Every structure is written in C-alpha cells, then in structure tokens.
Amino acid sequence: MADYIPRPDAEFNNWQANFISYLNSHMAELGLSAADLSLLTAAQLQWANTFSALLATQAAANAAIQNKNNARDSFETALRSMVRRMQGLPTVTEAMRAEMNISLRETTRAAAGVPTTRPVASVDTSQRLRHTINFVDEATPTKRSKPDGVMGCEIRVKVGGDAPAGPTGLQFLGIDTRTPYTSEYEGEDAGKIAHYMLRWVNTRGEQGPWSQTVSATIGG
C-alpha cells in the first residue's frame, strides 16, 4: 500500500498544512487539546523554517547558475569570434592551431558509415503510465554517447500481447537524438506490457541492426 504521506517536499508541505489545519479546526470533535498538538506544532514550525531556507537557497543557486550561463554564452561568443579571425589569417599554421587547441582545418569529411552496432535499452517504470527508455551502444555500454556518424535512435513499440519476433507491426515512436526517450500511455494501457525495439540511424538516414526486444509493464 502506498504511503499516505507524499515523498516530494512540495507535496508533503501541502499535505501537512492541510492535516494540521484540520486538526486545529476540529479539536473538539476529535477529542484533542492544544497540548496534544504542541509537539506537532513545534515540528511544523521547524519544518517551515528549514523548507523556506531550502527554497531560498535553491532560488539563489538557480539565479547564480543562470548568471554563470549568461556570462559563459557571452564569453564563448567572443572567443568564437576571435577563433574565426585566427582561422582566416594566412600566417596561422596548423601547428599554431594545435597549440591554441582550436579546430584544425578539415580537408575532407568522411561520410558517415552505416551503423553496425545495436542499441541496448533499459526501461524505467517508476512513473505511472510512463516509460523512460534509456539506451546506450552495445560497444560502449558504460557511456551515453552514440556511435560516430549516428544521428539518433529509432524506437518502435508493440503494446500488449506476446513479444514480437521482429520489427514488423511495431508502432513507430520516434527518432531520439539523446537518451532517454519518454513514452506516455493512457489509463486503458495500465497493466499491459510494452515491447520495444531500437536501432541506430546515421546522418544520412541509414539504419543499423535492430536491438534485442526489451519489455516492461505499464504501471497504473
């Protein structure tokens, strides 16, 4: 059975406020006195103070992060402008570019090859009527990066029934350029099993081999 006290702080804050307010408004009906509520009231005050302090700290941190991001964006714009100027100077050699750690001039661009490896998927079912599909490459399972030349991961699904033997008949969900992918479901799908198959797609739209089927129950 789910706990009646919500875990997220914001939801807990609303719940406790309603609960304490009800107790205070119905003390006579509930057979309570002010002394009975004294410990709760003290704990509520301590919670309110610490929660307010946390919210203030988070707001300040978010503002500091935004200021940092804005400063970096402006700085990067100026840096890239200077790099473009350096790249246009005939006196700047490849050795000088290497010492400055700026991009070397490309002479030829290798065409993206057809993907030869497969995605490996895992499904997070912790949210109601939602599957969060994480995917990595089978050749580098500890890294989140895609294979070279890959634009994204094509994801297909079959909801209900037995696991498919192949991709025929699966519904196209999308091509995700970055893990994870989130799939939302309707209430009528609760309790059903979703079967997923994935494959890499390169920048020219060429597809690699299909992954193993990964299946997960849709939570209600």
Image (cartoon, grey):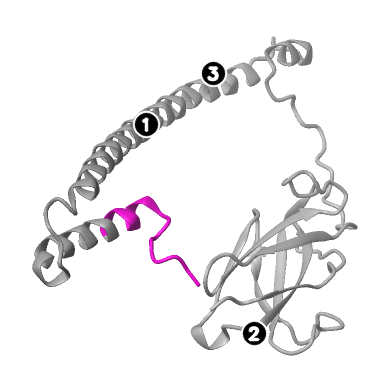
- Amino acid type at circle 2 is Lys
**At 65% across and 54% down in the image, what residue appears?**
179
Q: Is residue 100 above or below residue 69?
A: above
Q: Which residue is label 3 attached to?
A: 82
Q: Residue 15 shows which numbered tag?
A: none
Q: Secondary structure at mark 1?
A: helix
Answer left or right for 6 relative to 87. Answer: left
Mark 2 Cα within 10 Å, few/some/many (few <14, many 20+)?
some
Task: Give the Cα separation between the discs numbered 2 and 1.
Answer: 42 Å
Q: Which residue is label 1 attached to?
A: 61
**At 32% across and 32% down in the image, what residue appears?**
57
**At 48% across and 69% down in the image, what residue appears?**
2
- Amino acid type at circle 3 is Met
Residue 10 among those drawn in magenta: yes
> Residue 4, how many percent across, how many down?
39, 66
Q: Observer-nearest residue: 204 or 29?
A: 29
- The boundaries of the magenta stretch are 1-14
Earlier-in-chain disc, 2 versus 1: 1
